[in-house]
Image (cartoon, helix red, strand yellow):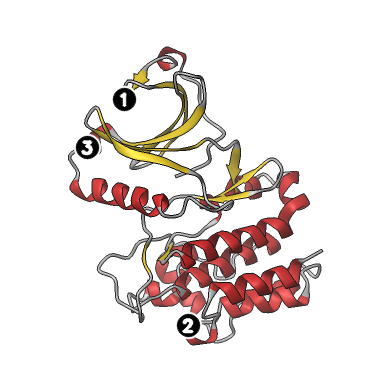
Amino acid sequence: MADLLKGTALDDLKQKSFAGKFYHQELLNSGGMSEIWLVTDGRGKPYALRKLKKELRFNFLARRRFARGCEVLSKLNESNFIVGYVEHVRAEGTPYMLMDYVEAENLKELFAKQDPILAENVAQILIDASSGLLHVHESGYMHLDFKPENILVTRNGSVRLIDFDTAIPIPEKPTKQSKNPGTPGYMAPEQLQREPIDARADIFAYGVMAYEILTNHKPFPGETPAEILAAQLNPAGPVRPREHNPGIPAAMEGVILKCLALDPDRRYHFMSVLANDVQSALYL
C-alpha cells in the first residue's frame, strides 16, 4: 500500500461510480494485490478507497489477507498516527475498504528524493512513527511490515501508519509463524531464520528504519534475504550511526543500536519504553 497523494488521473473513469455512492476521481496507487482510489461521495467529500484487484476476487488467500488488514485497521482508528478507518464491506463482488483521504507521501519516497520536508521534520517523524507503532502494540497487534513505505508523511510533517495486511495479534510468548510476511531488509534475524517471533520484531524494524533515515545507509546491506541475514549475524555488528552522521544525538544512537540487537532479549521489550526514549533523545 503506497502513498495517498501521487497518482495518475484517469479522466475517462472520473465519474464512474462504485458501490452506488462513490465516484472515482484518481487512481492513487496500484500494487500487487489492490488499488487505491481517490473517490468522493455524493456531497463531494474525498476518501481513499482501497479495493482488491478484480483478478484476485476468487483468490482465497488474497481475500483473507485483504480482510485481515481491514479488520486490524478497524480496531486502530482512534489515533492521530494511524490512517483513519471508515468502513469495509463488499460491493459489486469486490471487497473494499474506505479510509480518510490524506494528502501525503510515504517516507520512502521523501527519503529517495531528499525532500526538504524530511530534513525539517525528521525528529518529529521518528517520534510520531514510534508513537504510531506503540498504538498498534497497545491495541494488541504487531505490524510485521513496518518500513518507510508504510509511513505516510503530510506536508506539515505529521505521520500516519498504513498497511496492516500482515499484522497479527501479539502472542503471549514468541511463536513460530506458518507464513513469513514482511520485507527482508526490515526483518529481524529471528524472522529471516523462521524462528519464533513476537512484537520485538517490530522494534528491530523501527531500528532499521531510523538508522536508514538518519544515516542514508542500511545497517545490514544485502540484495537477498541470505545476504541480509549474513550481515546481521556478523559479530562486528552494524557501523555505529554516528560514524555515518556525527549530528545524530548520542542518546538516539544508543536507542537505535538497542533496537538492532541480534538477540531479542537485548532489545527493548516494550514499545512504550522505546517511544519514551526516542522522544527523550530527539526532543528539541
To which residue does mark 2 refer? 264
Neighbor class of circle 3 (other Cα within 10 Å; few <14, some 14-19, many 20+) is some
In terms of sequence position, does the residue under pointer 1 or pointer 2 come before the other? 1
Q: Quadrant of the C terminus?
A: bottom right
To which residue does mark 3 refer? 57
- Residue pictured at 24% horizontal, 27% vertical: 92
- Residue pictured at 44% horizontal, 73% vertical: 199
Q: Answer above or below: position of 85 versus 211.
A: above
Q: Answer above or below: position of 236 versus 126.
A: below
Quarter of the figure with residue 241: bottom right
Secondary element under disc 1, as helix, strand or loop, is: loop
Q: Quadrant of the N terminus?
A: top left
Residue 190: x %, y % from top left = 40, 77
Amino acid at circle 2: Pro
How much space separates mark 3 and mark 1, taking CA atoms?
A: 16 Å
Residue nearer the viewer, 76 or 162: 76
Amino acid at circle 3: Arg
To which residue does mark 1 refer? 19
